[in-house]
Image (cartoon, rainbow, N blue to C red):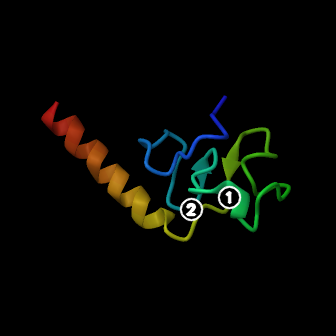
Amino acid sequence: MLTRTRNRYHLPLEAADTETRTAGCRHTDSSICAKNSLEHVCAFVRTDEMCLAPPASWPKQYRKLKALATEQKSSG
């Protein structure tokens, strides 16, 4: 089960993360998310814990985290 209370925005990518959805909440402050607890959208109420409404900044952060993971893989 994913940690729901911790800010996960900067943590490494999960296998299920994409540019349009995240495994768990990736908002820096989920309490101010307009879609917090919205059925079928918010990770907090979905049984699969997928968020279908990540922050608007998420696609850029996703690409950054993906590049970082690729870089670490090639250097390690």
Q: Is residue 68 above or below residue 56?
A: above
Asked which quadrant contains residue 60, the reply is: bottom left
Q: Is residue 19 above or below residue 49?
A: below
Q: Residue at x 41, y 41 (%)?
A: 12
Lower sequence index among marks 1 and 2 = 2
Give the residue type at disc 2: Thr
Asked which quadrant contains residue 28, the reply is: bottom right
Q: Residue at x 44, y 43 (%)?
A: 11
Q: Are there few (<14), some (14-19), or many (20+) residues within 10 Å of tag 1?
A: some
Q: Residue at x 36, y 51 (%)?
A: 65
**Circle 2 residue:** 20
Quarter of the image containing the C terminus?
Answer: top left
Whether label 1 touches label 2, CB < 8 Å = yes
Q: Residue at x 67, y 55 (%)?
A: 30
Q: Which mark is residue 52?
A: 1
Q: How many numbered discs sit on the rendered protein?
A: 2
Q: Which mark is residue 11?
A: none
In depth, the one of 9 and 65 nearer the eye is 9
Tell me where residue 47 appears, x and y as whole percent: 79, 38
Look at the numbered disc 2 and give the secondary structure of its residue: loop
Tell me where residue 56 appears, x and y as whole percent: 55, 71
Quarter of the image containing the N terminus?
Answer: top right
Q: Are there few (<14), some (14-19), or many (20+) residues within 10 Å of tag 2?
A: some
Left or right: residue 57 compared with residue 39: left
Give the residue type at disc 1: Leu
Q: Is residue 46 above or below residue 19?
A: above
Tell me where residue 37 appears, x and y as whole percent: 82, 54
Q: CA distance from mark 1 to mark 2?
A: 7 Å
Outermost residue toward the right in this view? 39
Look at the numbered disc 1 and give the secondary structure of its residue: loop
